[in-house]
Amino acid sequence: MNQTVGQTSSLVEEPPEVDLATAAGFLRAQYGIDAELQALRSERDLNFLAVADDGRQLVLKVSNSGDDPGQIAMESAAMRHVALVDPGLPIPRIVDTVDGEQVVTLKADDGRVHQVRVMTVMPGAVGDLAVLPDRFATDFGEVCARLARALQGFGHPSADRRLDWDPRLVTALRPFAQQLPDANRRAPMEKLLDRFEGLEEATKRLPAFVLHGDVTLSNVLLDADGISGVIDFGDMHHTARVADLAISLTSLLRESADPWPAAAAFLDAYQRVLPLEPEEVELIGELVLARMAASVLMSAWRAPLYPDNYEYLTSLVAGSWHGLDLLAGMDATELADRFHRLCGTSRVESAQRLDPSLSKRRGAALGGQLSPLFYREPLQVVRAAGAWVHTADGRRYLDAYNNVPVVGHAHPAVVQAISRQAAVLNINSRYLHPNAVELAERLTASMPLGLDTCVFVNSGSEANDLAWRMARVVTGRSGVMVADLAYHGVSEATAAWSTNTYPPSARPAHVAVFDAPRLDADGQQPSGVEAGRRVRLAHDELRRAGQDVALLAVDSVFSSAGILTPTGRFMRGLQDETHALGGLFLADEVQAGFGRGGRNLWRFTDFGLTPDFVTLGKPMGNGHPIAALITRREIVEQFIAIDEFFSTFAGNPVSCVAALTVLDVIEQNGLVEQSGRIGAELSAGLADLAPRLHPAARVRGQGLMVGVEVPPEAPLTAADLAERLREQGVFVGTTGPGGTVLKIRPPLIWDQGHVAYFLKAFQAAALT
């Protein structure tokens, strides 16, 4: 029902005139209830407390004759809906008549006909007449959100109505600004109303449904345990969720000397139940101000009309002016920023704006070239979805490089799992939690027999570092062997193994290298016998330095060496010779694992290996920091005989649920097989195009780990090609000796369309 300002029927009509005797007789006749009645305070309706002969306490509610019967039916239906959806919410229950009706009519002595309902009494004192307990703001926020959530599935044809006190429509009350009792308030109010002119339009884009519309202190009951009741569904209408929130928050802030602690407690509790959209948070402050303005304007209109009810009609004025004086001095941007900070919605949105100063600020605060950025002109990335990354300048790039989001950027299932677990619990792994146990069970079940123990860490570096600690304890030795141009991490121990990051002259004495499995001059792969020989040469180097081998670590795709594809014989030769020399063997699956090779979940299983250690990292949580070391129980038992391991964040419930969901997505979507199929198409397409770079250009790799070797004599270097691909809308990297190999390592969700887009960009870049 649409109303023009000042014409809402239930505000214009006088409250019902029904005496106690008439009400008691009506209750007896219609409901079969004998009771003692007493009148309760009310603005537009007439309410009686009925104490029945059987001890029950009920409310007999006689609605204003100006109220729409359809709206009353809506209120009753909503109350039943809420009671079904969230039975724990403390709201009244409708009592049926002896004929099973929820609503009946009563004709008063003045001839007006009123809708009548009976409902149960909620215990407690009315909130605006009680001393609010310390936790009230928190409890209030939770109850408001629960009621909003319970009403999300409710609809009714009478919900489409305009209410004069709706904060979205406050500018319709402008005629009453000049009726404010304090003349000094009139001009500032007019100016404030100008600020709200676009409010109704702005809220049309926000989540909206049928809501209570008046969960305020006057409609909340309190007892010793907190909120004991939410009453009066008479203002229900279809509205923006944030407008309903703002009505409740305004009621709280009117009673708060300092609005911000109360607002923070309310919003924290609300968002534990119903997280808000940034667009909603943007308008909270404006809607709160609008509701306060509506309160003083409504009072200026109605108080002179009903002098007998003056005290009630002006009861919100002082608190509203107090709130307006505190908040209206902030402009809309400043007020919105404050609420964004309270709600945690400011950072994500603001980070999506182009910031020309960002590169300079980063250089000053983050060590300059300590961690160089990609590309000659660094990119400010703002969001990503699936295989695409968006930058602040509005461009979109196909991601052919970042293997961390192994199932695609911002995968909705992973985001959902992380968000929901973070909203419930995140705590260290000194406590029992099923996420960690299930993840460990699933990972060890995917490994060869004997690899039965999982230890969670935060990164691949930590996983390799812990394996090193265990290997030294178990073997009693302190030497490690790695491939030339290897990369295994950034800790002190693993940085020493990362021979691609420093010159040979800086290599520590306890680190020896073996040659990675590059093709020989005849284009042949090195054999298993050759692998054994290379291990022995590295071992000899250790012995000359007074060391002996504790561990050989190998990345089975030899990513930093240029993306190589060894044979199973070569890899088994590495493992077998290491064991023969008394060392332990580590398969570093940080880059190679989770199906990237397109044949098995773990690349080392392609070669028939059974390592002593398997380390997992980057893709495990699709960007959430979680990694793992998988090993044998006897190795762990030898380690814990002299030491223990604990990492505060390792194996926390949120990280583990991210990793569990990654496994689910890989399994449910067949991404291992898809990686093999799509990777083969990509490699074949590149093999056709690579000669355009140079006749000696070669493509190698397996699955979705592909390298394009660009010979030094080619007109374009690999680095130049990477820059040109960026210009064509594709992210790639470089690797290998001197950075001569284009590194292509996309998310496993790539399909034929992504391959076609990449090949088209590659062709354009190669020919430019």
Image (tube, rainbow, N blue to C red):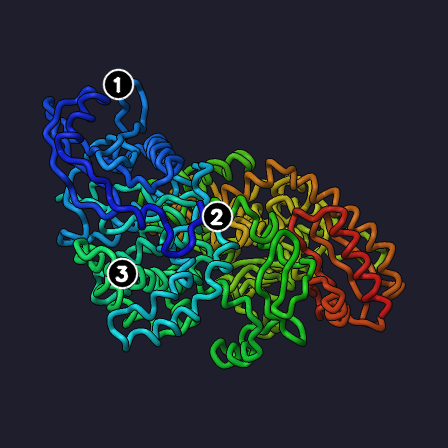
Report which quarter residue 83 is drawn in.
top left
Residue type, label 1: Val
Q: Earlier in the sequence, mark 1 or mark 3?
A: 1
Q: Nearer the viewer, residue 90 or 394?
A: 90
Instruction: Read off the residue under disc 2.
Output: 629
Between marks 2 and 3, how big is the CA–CA gap?
68 Å
Could you tell me residue 527's position as x and y percent? 74, 48
Circles 2 and 3: CB atoms closer than 8 Å: no
What residue does disc 3 label?
299
In the image, taking residue 86 as reference, residue 656 lies left or right, namely: right
Q: CA distance from mark 1 to mark 3?
A: 41 Å
Please state which of the two labelled residues, at mark 2 or mark 1, is closer to the viewer: 1
Question: On the picture, is 566 further left or further right than 435?
Answer: right
* Residue occupying image coordinates x 14% and y 39%: 39
Q: Nearer the viewer, residue 499 or 363?
A: 363
User: Which residue lies at the image location 53% right of the left edge and 44% below the top edge?
Assistant: 413
The quarter of the picture where residue 51 lies is: top left
Quadrant including the N terminus: top left
Residue 464 numbered mark, or none: none
Residue positioned 56% across, 44% down in the render: 611
Q: Secondary structure at mark 1?
A: loop
Report the quarter where the C terminus lies. Answer: bottom right
Element at label 2: strand
In the rendered view, would you say 121 is above or below 513? above
> Which comes sooner in the sequence, label 2 or label 3?
3
- The image quadrant of residue 210 is top left
- In front of the other: 457 or 497: 457
Residue where numbered disc 1 is placed: 98
Residue 318: image x %, image y %?
21, 65
For disc 3, the neighbor class at 10 Å (few under 14, some 14 to 19, many from 20) is many
Q: Secondary structure at mark 3?
A: helix
